[in-house]
Image (cartoon, rainbow, N blue to C red):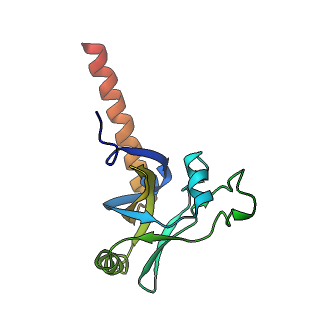
Amino acid sequence: MADKKNEQKTVAENKKARHDYFVEEVYEAGIELFGTEVKSIRAGGVNLKDSYCDIDGGELFALGVHVSPYEQGNIFNRDPLRPKRLLMHKKEIMKLTGLVSRDGYTLVPLSLYFKGSRLKMALGLCRGKKLYDKRDTAAKRDADRTIERAMKDRF
């Protein structure tokens, strides 16, 4: 029997983030939401594309995360693009502040998932890719694919 507390169910992924950035490290953070937002996320009404994180006054916020209004939510629905506070230990936030202040680093939400009954967000400490890096990645992926096909045909 699987352990329900550690079971992870991915709700949304930011595939564009891995295309546009080199992910150096991955962190896990809780996310502060209202009830109707959680219900909307459970129904799949969330989009992480073009989202990013910002540290303001010692607190960590996810900006640009679009949570669609819950259909049965009426007056309790919140603004879909409101900044969502992320929950991490103070030491981790201070460490991230130091890392992000360096040149070229940013915090990007990579995925949103349920860990047991709690909603968590995977944050990536990322460095931006140049256009030639993106082309190299695509060329490497294509080469790996052709090698796999050749090996499959050979055996």
Q: Position of residue 39 (x, y in %)?
A: 59, 52
Q: Quadrant of the N terminus?
A: top left
Q: Is residue 62 above or below residue 141?
A: below
**Residue 16 percent coordinates (x, y):** 50, 52
Rendered residue at 33%/48% (across/down): 5
In depth, the one of 41 and 83 nearer the eye is: 41
Left or right side of 117 for 91: left
Q: Residue furthest left?
A: 155
Quarter-wise, where is residue 120 in the image?
A: bottom left
Q: Give how far across and how far down residue 127 sits, in percent.
A: 37, 66
Q: Could you tell me how many numbered marks the image carries?
A: 0
Q: Which residue does the image show at 47% across and 75% down from the upper left?
A: 54
Report whether 21 appears left or right of 41: left
In the picture shown, does residue 56 fall above or below 107?
below
Which of the 4 image quarters holds residue 126? bottom left
94, 138: nearer the viewer = 94
Residue in the image at 55% along x and 47% along y? 42
x 31%, y 26%: residue: 148
Q: Position of residue 35 (x, y in %)?
A: 58, 60
- Vertical position of residue 11 compared to residue 92: above or below: above
